[in-house]
Image: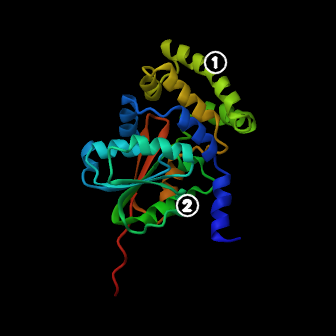
């Protein structure tokens, strides 16, 4: 099998068409997205000043939008669904130094170009996450960083053992319009639970103030993917270590997910 066909096979096992439907429906940039981005990256706004960035699996461009408002110099945002890319281009139109390109994370050709490559909420939906992180590391200059935000296994037992099997067996296979209709009553249950103070934890305190539509977008996104991986702390660290990254740091985001970040090493000096 050729490299191109291997990449196509890996991409087909994911859910770009299903997420394209979701991004096309929920395309607005919301103030709450900034707070989510800051939590997911666990970085100060000043970190991004002057950096060349790569957003791999950019969705509607919201995770590129915020670094640009924080002073990033520009860069590249990639995704593969045409509906998604149209929304990203519209949202990122104020930033001409950002290129929005139709390209999968497995196909990024740049090497040693960016100061930071990040992928937020994407790698855990891929059939070959190791290859994806290695491609991110390849795109970054020596001394630059790779950052991924991953679903955590810790504190997500009910999702891993109850909801995830249901998603895999049923929701991931149903027509998207039907899944979206089913997401509404589930969102209603979540909305009521949040107003009663359940479930506990920082993530649920955060989303308690979200609109019903924003909550439905979250519920729907959890229902539709073919693949959803949940990482322990050790597994998240190993994912970056396998790509040759150094100085790996992990932040337990909202006590239910991991921000994993590592540095691309400088090439060894000749003896």
Residue behind mark 2: 106
Judged left or right of residue 124, residue 47 is left
Q: Secondary structure at mark 2?
A: helix
Return the mark for residue 139: none
Residue behind mark 1: 185
Q: Secondary structure at mark 1?
A: helix
Q: Quadrant of residue 6?
A: bottom right
Return the residue nearer the eye: 244 or 219. 219
- 32 to 3, vertically: above or below: above
Image location of residue 74, percent across then percent down: 32, 54
Q: CA distance from mark 2 to mark 1?
A: 36 Å
Crowdedness of circle 1 by 10 Å Cα count: few (<14), some, many (20+)? few
Image location of residue 43, percent across then percent down: 32, 44
Say whether residue 41 is visible: no
Residue at point 43% right, 23% down? 205
Judged left or right of residue 7, residue 99 is left
Split into 4 quadrants, where in the image is the N terminus? bottom right
Residue at point 53% right, 37% down? 23
Return the residue nearer the eye: 69 or 154. 69
Residue at point 56% right, 52% down? 80
Return the residue nearer the eye: 100 or 226. 100
Q: Quadrant of residue 154?
A: top right
């Amino acid at each position: 099998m050729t490299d191109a066909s291997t990449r196509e096979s890996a991409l087909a096992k994911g859910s770009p068409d299903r997420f394209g439907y979701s991004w096309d429906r929920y395309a607005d940039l919301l103030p709450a997205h900034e707070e989510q981005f800051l939590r997911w990256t666990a970085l100060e706004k000043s970190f991004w000043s002057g950096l060349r960035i790569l957003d791999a699996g950019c969705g509607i461009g919201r995770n590129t939008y915020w670094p640009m408002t924080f002073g990033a110099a520009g860069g590249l945002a990639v995704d593969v669904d045409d509906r998604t890319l149209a929304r990203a281009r519209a949202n990122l139109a104020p930033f001409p130094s950002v290129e929005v390109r139709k390209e999968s994370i497995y196909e990024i050709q740049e090497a040693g170009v960016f100061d930071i490559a990040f992928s937020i909420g994407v790698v855990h939906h891929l059939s070959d996450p190791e290859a994806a992180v290695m491609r991110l590391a390849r795109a970054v200059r020596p001394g630059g960083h790779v950052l991924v935000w991953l679903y955590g296994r810790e504190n997500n037992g009910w999702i891993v053992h109850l909801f995830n099997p249901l998603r895999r067996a049923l929701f991931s296979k149903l027509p998207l319009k039907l899944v979206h209709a089913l997401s509404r009553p589930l969102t209603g249950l979540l909305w009521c639970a949040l107003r009663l103070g359940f479930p506990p934890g920082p993530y649920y305190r955060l989303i308690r103030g979200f609109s019903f539509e924003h909550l439905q977008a979250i519920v729907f996104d959890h229902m539709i993917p073919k693949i959803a991986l949940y990482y322990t702390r050790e597994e998240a660290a190993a994912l970056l270590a396998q790509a040759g990254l150094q100085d790996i740091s992990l932040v337990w985001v909202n006590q239910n997910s991991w921000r994993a970040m590592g540095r691309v090493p400088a090439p060894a000096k000749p003896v």
